[in-house]
Image (tube, grey):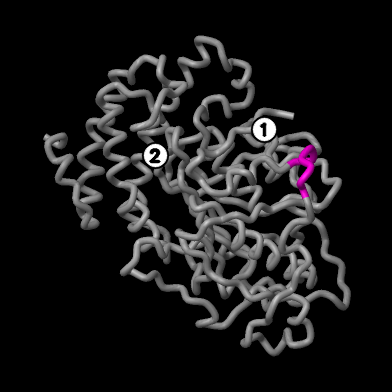
Amino acid sequence: MVEHRSLTSEQKGKDLLDCNGNRDNCEKHPGASSSSSLPQAAFELFSSIKASIFQTLGVTSLSRKFSSVPTFEEGNESNFLGKKDMDTCGNDPESRPVSTVQSSEDITPYCEVIKTRERNDFPVSLDNNSSDQLKQFDVIDNCSDHHFFDEGKGLSLSQVKKDWVKKVQQEWNILEKNLPETIYVRVFEERMDLMRTAIVGASGTPYHDGLFFFDIRFPPEYPSEPPMVHYNSGGLRLNPNLYESGKVCLSLLNTWSGTATEVWNPGASTILQVLLSLQALVLNEKPYFNEAGYDQQKGRAEGEKNSVSYNENAFLVTCKSILYLLRKPPKHFEALVEEHFRQRSKHILMACKAYLEGAPIGCAFGGGKTEHENQKGTSAGFKIMLAKLFPKLVEAFSDKGIDCSQFAEMQK
C-alpha cells in the first residue's frame, strides 16, 4: 500500500506498525474476548452488569519488556497505518453525522457510567526512589484540566450502551499490554470517556526526546465514531498535522479525507493504532512531506532542501515545547515530565552541541553511518537561534536539580 515509517530499534512495540491485512500471523486481537477477575469495589448501580464488563487492570513499569503484539480479526483487510494519516488539513472533510444511540434495555445513563472506579483501586503515586517506575499505563484521580472535560460532564440526555463500556475497557486492556516504552497513557477514575497520553519523540527525527501530550475523548457513539484527539500545543506549531489550536489532522480520526483503508474502521481500528500513527507517521523524520501534496517533492533537490529547513525549525520548536513543559507540566504529570527530562536532558544538550557544530538534525550520535551523512551542515540562522535557546535549556534543567555542569562552558 505505502511504505510505512518504522520506529527506531530502541523503541518497543515497533512490530505493531506492521500488522495489516497481508500478514499471515494476524490473529484475533488480544483482550477482545477474555474476561478476568472483577474489581472488589463497584458502583451498586452496575451490580447487575459488572460481571460482563469490568476487567481488572494492572500497572506496567518502564522496565517491562513488551513482547505482546496486538493482532486483529482474521480477514481484516485494512492497513494498520495508512498513507493519508500523514496528510494535513486543507479544507475540513464534511461533518460527520453524529450517530443517535437507540434506547434499549442495554443503555446506562452516561453521566453515571463514566465514573468507573473508586479511590485506591490502583496506585497512582510515583516511586521517587526509582527512576524506572514510570508507569506506561495508569489510572489517576482527576482530569479537571482535560481539554474535553466539559463536553461529557453531566450530560443528562446522553446515554451509552453497555457495549460502549466494554469497548473502552477493551481499549484499556490493549494499551496496558502493548504500549511501547515511549508512550504513556493515563485514564481517569472519575471519567471513563477521557484519556491523556504522552508520546516521546523518536530518535532520528527532529522531535527526538521531546514529550508531546494529547487529550483524548471517547464519544458516546464510540467506536462507530472515532475518538476525539486534541494536541496540547502550548501555542506552538511544530508539525503540519498538529495545529496551534490543538487540532490533529489524521484520516484515521476522520479529520482528513482518506480511502476506506485509511479512515476509522469501527470494527478494527483502536486507540493504540492512533497513538502509534501519531508517533511514527506524524512525528516522523521528514515532517515537511506531511503537508498535503508535498510528498510529490520527495527525492527532488528543492523538496529535500525544504525538508532540511523544516527539520531545523521543528527542532527549535521542540526545544521551546520542552521549556514550556518544564514550566507548566500537565496536571498530575509533573513527576513524569521531570523524570523523563532527568533521564534525557544530557542527550538533548549533547544533540544541541552537535547541531551547533553542524551535524544534521536527527542524526544518530555515537552510531555508524546515517542517511544524513551527505547532507550539508545546519544553517547559520538555525545556529543563531539554537545558541539562544541552549542556555535556557541548561537553566531549566538545572532548576530541576539536573547536573548540567559539563555544558556550563557553552552557556558563556
Q: Main secondary structure of the magenta part?
A: loop
Q: Residues within 10 Å of mark 2 (few under 14, many from 20)?
A: many
Residue occupied by mark 1: 91
Residue at the image position 51 percent from the left and 9 percent from the top: 301
Image position of 364 (left or right of 97):
left
Q: How many marks?
A: 2
Residue 335 is inside the magenta segment: no
Let me know if residue 22 is in the magenta part: yes
Give me the disc on residue 357.
none
Residue for point 22% across, 53% down: 402
Q: Nearer the viewer, residue 68 or 405?
A: 68
Q: Nearer the viewer, residue 299 or 196?
A: 299
Q: Quadrant of the N terminus?
A: top right
Between the C-alphas of marks 2 and 1, the distance is 27 Å
Percent from the top left, x then y, of residue 224?
79, 55
In terms of secondary structure, where does tag 1 sit? loop
Q: Position of residue 168 (x, y in %)?
A: 69, 65
Q: Residues within 10 Å of mark 1 (few under 14, many from 20)?
A: few
Residue drawn at the location 58% of the way across and 48% of the way down: 13
The residue under label 2 is: 318
* Camera sees residue 331: no
Q: Is 354 situated above or below 78?
A: above
Give, as a three-letter code, the residue at label 2: Thr
Give the answer, above or below, for where 234 lies relative to 30: above
Q: Residue at x 37, y 54 (%)?
A: 340
Say what secondary structure mark 2 lies in.
Answer: helix
Query: Can residue 356 be seen by looking at this rendering?
Result: yes
What percent of the width, then of the height, locates residue 273?
A: 66, 48
Highlighted range, magenta: 20-26
- Residue 189 or residue 91, whichever sits in front: 189
| Quadrant containing the C terminus in the rendered view | top left
163 over 340 or under it: above or below: below
